């Protein structure tokens, strides 16, 4: 009897975990970006429990996937990368600012300004999440 495991589509959880790792996100960071709990994210990746549809928007945004990607995966398709450059640009800006914040060779004043920028980036991401939820995407 032939083994057809190689023909099987990866699960939603497997695709989510791989994308999170590809983006260099921790579970905590990904969950925060998606506006869900760490436990919900862990269950999503493990396939332990179905994720509720109202969480899809945040998860797709955290993974830089286009809206509807999770439903496409559930139907046997593949996720579509988001076309919005701002997500990628914002991630790059955050990485650069974190480097300033963590650099012990920078003055306390510079590190403090970097920390303030990181807080603004976090607030911006939260506002984007709220806006997407309000749109009902």
Image: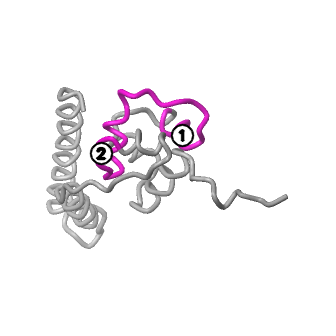
Task: Name the foreground residue: 31 vs 70.
Answer: 70
- Placement of 9 over or under 110, stated as above or below: above
The answer to which image quadrant residue 88 occupies is bottom left
Residue furthest right in the image: 1
Frontmost of labels 1 and 2 is 2
User: Circle 1 sits on which residue?
Assistant: 42
For image coordinates 31% across by 56% down, the residue present is 81
Q: How far across and down, in percent of the image, does residue 126 sit?
A: 23, 37
Task: Name the foreground residue: 11 vs 59.
Answer: 11
Membership of 44 in magenta stretch: yes
Q: How far across and down, in percent of the image, does residue 72 sit?
A: 41, 44
- Placement of 131 over or under 10, stated as above or below: above
- At mark 2, the secondary structure is helix
For image coordinates 43% across by 52% down, the residue present is 78
The magenta segment: 40-68
Please tell me which of labels 1 and 2 falls first in the chain.
1
Q: How far across and down, in percent of the image, does residue 36 sit?
A: 39, 33
Other residues around mark 2 within 10 Å, as few (<14) / some (14–19) / many (≥20): many
The answer to which image quadrant residue 93 occupies is bottom left
How has the structure been colored for display? Answer: one colour
For image coordinates 17% across by 36% down, the residue present is 127
Quarter of the image with the N terminus is bottom right
């Amino acid at each position: 009897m032939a083994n057809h495991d190689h023909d099987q589509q990866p699960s939603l959880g497997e695709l989510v975990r791989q994308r999170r790792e590809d983006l260099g996100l921790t579970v905590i960071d990904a969950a925060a970006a998606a506006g869900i709990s760490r436990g919900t994210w862990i269950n999503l990746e493990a396939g332990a429990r179905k994720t509720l549809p109202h969480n899809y928007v945040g998860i797709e945004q955290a993974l830089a996937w286009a809206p509807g990607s999770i439903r496409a995966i559930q139907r046997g398709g593949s996720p579509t990368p988001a076309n919005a450059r701002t997500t990628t640009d914002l991630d790059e800006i955050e990485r650069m600012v974190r480097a300033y914040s963590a650099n012990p060779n920078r003055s306390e004043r510079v590190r403090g300004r970097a920390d303030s920028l990181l807080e603004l980036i976090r607030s911006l991401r939260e506002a984007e999440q709220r806006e997407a939820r309000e749109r009902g995407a």
